[in-house]
Amino acid sequence: MQHYALYQTDTRRIIGMLQQWQALLALPGDAQAATVTLAEVQNVVLALQHAFGPGATLETIIQQLVAQDLREQLQRRRQTQRDLTSAA
């Protein structure tokens, strides 16, 4: 999925990308979103590289994380069902 039409220049594309990172990395309810640093972005990237390998595509990482999230949801539901069954 390409969004090149949204950005008329490389500079605008970089601005948009940085604004997205800023919004995503700021703490919830943080009025100081402007304090997000490149070091924080780098830490996220390094953690992802460590977990998935430096050659992993973003799509592969997304798919693996979605699968992990679904497994975690199922585990929580099963635990809740076990808790309800044992409480009854």
Image (spheres, rainbow, N blue to C red):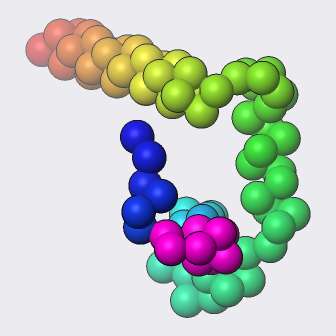
Residue 81 lies left or right of residue 76; in this view the side is left
Magenta stretch: dominant secondary structure: helix
Please report the bounds of the magenta region as a residue range.
Answer: 7-16
Residue 71 lies left or right of residue 13; in this view the side is left
Q: Which x, y percent locates residue 16?
A: 55, 72
9 inside magenta stretch: yes
Q: Which x, y percent locates residue 5?
A: 41, 63
* Farthest residue, direction left: 88
**Residue 42 can be seen in this image:** yes
Q: Which x, y percent locates residue 62?
A: 51, 30
Instruction: Choose between 85 and 21: the one closer to the eye.
Output: 21
Residue 46 lies left or right of residue 22; in this view the side is right
Residue at 73 percent of width and 83 percent of height: 35
The image shows residue 40, relative to residue 55, as above or below, that is below
**Residue 83 can be seen in this image:** no
Residue at 40 percent of width and 40 percent of height: 1
Q: Which x, y percent locates residue 59?
A: 52, 28
Instruction: Choose between 87 and 54: the one closer to the eye.
Output: 54
The image shows residue 34, relative to residue 3, as above or below, that is below
Looking at the rendering, which quadrant does residue 12 occupy? Answer: bottom right
Residue 67 lies left or right of residue 85; in this view the side is right
